[in-house]
Amino acid sequence: MSPSLIKALALATGLGFAGVGLAALAAAGPAMAQDHKNEQLYPLFTYRTGPYAPSFIPFGAGNRDYLTYINEVEGGVDGVKILIQECETAYTIERGIECYERYKNGYDGAPTAAIYPHSSGLDVALTDKARIDKVPIVSPGGGQNIATDGRVFPYQYPLIFDYWSEAQIIVDYIAQKSGGYDKLKGVKIATLYHDSGYGRDTIEPLGILAKKYGFTDIQIPVPHPGEQQQAQWQQIRSAGADWVFLRGWGVMTPVGIKTAARVGFPADRIIGDIWSGSEDDARPAGSAAKGYLAVSVFPPGTDYGIIKTLKEKIVDAGKSDLKDKSKFGTVYYNYGVIEAITFVEALRVGHKKFGNRPLTAEEGRWALENLNIDDKRIAELGAQGLISPLKTSPANHKGETVAAKIIQWDGKSWTTLTDWIKADASLFAETIRAKAAAYAQEKGITPVAQTN
């Protein structure tokens, strides 16, 4: 009801603005609450503002473009349309929690099956809330490693990748370049990390790996946002580091690459984290970035079948959320597509069990722990080379196979140096179970493997 109509009714009835307003809401409420009852809500947590906006903008476009394709070209997921509702977090935990509270119970009749917070910090902050509210929290590539244990964390899903696996893959690649794991003894690996929960998450696994293989583990923090790193890179040079694992975010990465060049540290001995391996991380560093390496879980490129389809059906058709078309097929755009694929495939799994209708949060939980995006399904999606197989279970919320590629910046774009490098899931399994058990004891949780 418009403000002018409320004003007119208030004058005519004598109820006053508040009375008419409440009466109007009461009358409209039941109808409004059912407007989207046949649709599946997808709360899109955005950060189009703030220091990390350049990372989100292509990511958000890839995310929306895939869902637009599903809705407008495929007619929805098994006929169920997806309702996208954006909520701006500015990449802050406080605003992220507000977005969670706003959409955890659905919107306008459309139920919530899962929430993707798009922030490692927010993922952690929502741990207890998600368990109490029974709302699945999904963080592809950025979740908590201990949340792999679905017996203790039934509502959190660090799908596809995690930072402990990344540490293992980095060491595996350096071992390959050194001539084998036995040649790691005495090699000095410095980790330059964003001084946050995200950045600190590889300290423990690298310590375990250093003890196992004999390399020297050097840990150097960089305060947020990372615009000053001269002292840290001087420390790296003084320590005689052979390799640097750069775990940055936002401006920290290009500043790190340029500072490395100033102190004479070679770019081809720096391996960036998955959040330090986009075009927007390398390009601003100019010529200093040539040869720079990065871990890639979201391979860039436009030759993948689904990316070609999106170009034809969405981008060229004028339906894309992407304003800067030069960002099409970049790391973050493709990341957005990959994440959207996990959401859609979870819905398909859920529909097979519960019927072709919108899923509730509890049904979304079941679907997320029964994902099986195998090679056959990847081919059907046109995503060969874009994603690696993903199979979850009630006890494993990350996926049986965790893998990444190593890519290299040639001065203009990324080239792929390796095929998928698989992490050894058994290497940290005992540690993860112990940490999850300790968390369960602290919170009074009884770990129980969920049944299907």
Image (cartoon, helix red, strand yellow):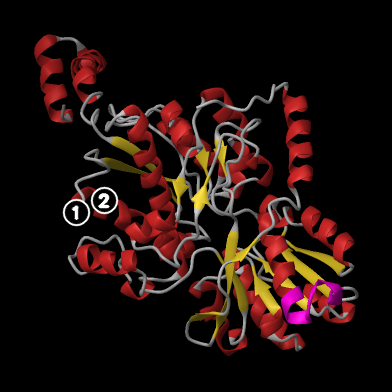
Say above or below: 68 vs 38.
below
Numbered label tally: 2
Residue 204 percent coordinates (x, y): 80, 53
Task: Report if residue 229 is visible in the image.
Answer: no
Residue 65 percent coordinates (x, y): 30, 57
Describe residue 8's horizontal placement relative to residue 106 as left or right.
left
- Residue 346, located in which quarter of the rendered image? top left
Mark drawn on residue 70: 2
Residue at the (65%, 79%) spot, across then down: 257
Q: Are marks 1 and 2 in contact (CB under 8 Å)?
A: yes
Say which element carries label 1: loop
Residue closer to the observer: 232 or 429? 429
**Amino acid at dot 2:** Ile
Mark drawn on residue 73: 1
Residue at the (59%, 61%) spot, across then down: 403
Query: Magenta stretch: residue 165 in it?
Result: no
Residue closer to the observer: 91 or 317? 317
